[in-house]
Amino acid sequence: MTTLANEPLLRIRDLAIEIGGRRLVAIDALDVARGEIAGLVGESGAGKSLLLAAILGLLPRDARLQGSIRFDGTELVGAPDATWRPIRGRRIAVVLQAARAALTPTLRTGTWIDRALALHGIPAGERAARVDHALATVRLDRGHLARYPHQLSGGEAQRISIALAVALRAELILADESTSALDVTVQAEVAERFLELRASEGTAFLVVSHDLALVAGLADRIAILEAGRIVEAGGPGILREPAHPVTRARSEEHTSELQSLAY
């Protein structure tokens, strides 16, 4: 498929997700441009995780999905397995809140990464170079490849997940509350890796979080999600002069943190 040069990498339109007859997500439009860090902020239950599951084609069986999710010009809603196979995990990667739990507990980290690369068709002779580059990108040494998940700190587990995305050369990383379980210092380190990865690899991110200050320090554009709907969107400047009461309330909760940001 030929992709229009100005089409976003991820383009969502008129998306509705229903479960048990209840409409839980209704998003008119959400885009992530190539090489952009987009932020989606919402409280628990706002629909953030459901939206990410829809982007990955992993909604519950009883969910009903309508609308359009296009990735690099390819329609994902209703797409067959053959369409998903080269996209999910490889071109669209995910970094989860519980990154350690996402690793296989009985496998050393290096084995886990190698198996993932093999699963996505990366030739054996190419894997070592990709892994070395990925480890350098996230600032880990090869010694981490010999560790089991329980031997990793929370920040190291997050960086291993990011390293896999780098090794696969993912074009879009979905970061789902990926720093919320970490202390402030490690949060800053992971956020710095995101910014470096965007600069060095041109990777796009959709950073999903309840933490407005964190997203404000990372994102080029921010959308505020409330009860499954985007109530306000724009550059980080919307946090200085929010138009919607929900954004205003969230901004007031984080006044001190936001005042320290040069957005």
Image: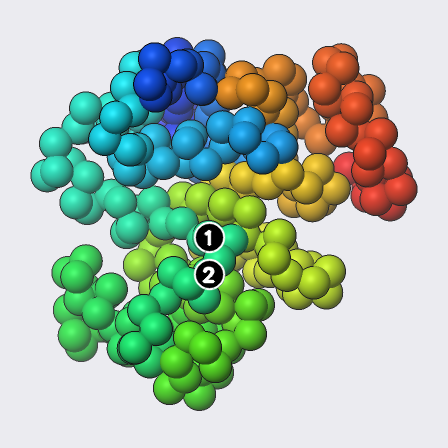
Across and down, in percent, residue 87 comes to: 24, 43
**Amino acid bearing label 1:** Leu
User: Looking at the picture, how far across and down is residue 22, in whole percent?
Assistant: 40, 14
Q: Quadrant of residue 6?
A: top left
Rendered residue at 80%/30% (across/down): 251
Total numbered labels placed on residues in the image:
2
Along the line of sight, the residue nearer the viewer: 34 or 254:
254
Question: What's under tag 2, amino acid-wise?
Answer: Ala
Cα gap from disc 1 to disc 2, whole angstroms: 5 Å
Q: Residues within 10 Å of mark 1 (few under 14, many from 20)?
A: many
Q: In terms of image quadrants, where is residue 132?
A: bottom left
Residue 75 visible in this rendered orientation of the protein:
no
Instruction: Determine whether 89 is above or below 12 in the image.
Output: below
Q: Is residue 151 left or right of residue 188?
A: left
Name above or below for residue 64 compared with residue 204: above
- As helix, strand or loop, the secondary structure at mark 1 comes to strand
Q: Which residue is mark 2?
A: 99
Residue 96 tag number? 1
Badge 2 element: helix
In depth, the one of 250 and 123 nearer the eye is 250
Residue drawn 34% across and 21% down? 19
Tag 1 and tag 2, C-beta contact below 8 Å: yes
Quarter of the picture holding the N terminus = top left
Say left or right for 237 vs 128.
right
